[in-house]
Image (tube, rainbow, N blue to C red):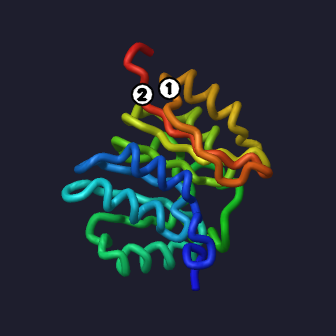
Amino acid sequence: MDATDEFPEYEAALLEGIRSSVESNNTVVVVGGGRGVSSVVAARQSAPNGHVTTYEGGAERVRVARETAVLSRVADSVSIEHGIIGSGIDIAGDGSDAISLEPDALPECDTLILDCEGAELEILESLDQRPQSIIVETHAFLDSPESAVRTKLDDIGYTIVNRGVELDEKGVYVLTAVRSEDK
């Protein structure tokens, strides 16, 4: 039994953000792929010709995410890399063999999804591309609070269009933002 069987609301706010933002034929980058659920949803939303590139720092989670993509029949449109973007603040499992990339090395995309356990602000501060939308899971308990993420998104030209709650008591929220045309 996996987390989605045990917790059917697993990552519900993040998945809602993906479903509302990712369009057919989009390219998507996921930083913090976890068990692969967000990558599968993004791949289904970006079908038939979109592509999802996912970075996950934990070796076991990379294996699980790849298996999730295969079992969900989206493996042809998902690339899962064992990689850490930025400082990798809170890696689940062994990240010793992961490649290390700076945020400005992320591939160009239409939608950027950040679920990277505290590295969100570092990535946003160093981002040199401007995707159509950015979905960020904030982590107050890992020094990436909602207020700071909101400010950074505004500073780089994005407007928050949705706020979802994952774990209110830990300050885990999902902000969905779109590029502001006037900034």
Q: How many marks?
A: 2
Q: Is residue 24 above or below residue 99?
A: above
Viewer-nearest residue: 42 or 161: 161
On residue 134, the disc is: none
On residue 159, the disc is: 1
Residue 25: horizontal and vertical position, in percent? 23, 50
On residue 179, the disc is: 2
**Label 1 crowd bin: few (<14), some (14–19), many (20+), radius 10 Å:** many
- Disc 2 and disc 1 in contact, CB within 8 angstroms: yes
Sequence order check, earlier mark of 2 and 1: 1
The kind of secondary structure element at disc 1 is strand
Residue 56: horizontal and vertical position, in percent? 53, 63
Q: Residue at x 60, y 48 (%)?
A: 137
Residue 102: horizontal and vertical position, in percent? 53, 46
Q: How far apart are marks 2 and 1 (CA)?
A: 6 Å
Q: In this view, does 154 lie above or below 145?
A: above
Viewer-nearest residue: 135 or 168: 168
Which amino acid, by three-letter code, is at mark 1?
A: Thr
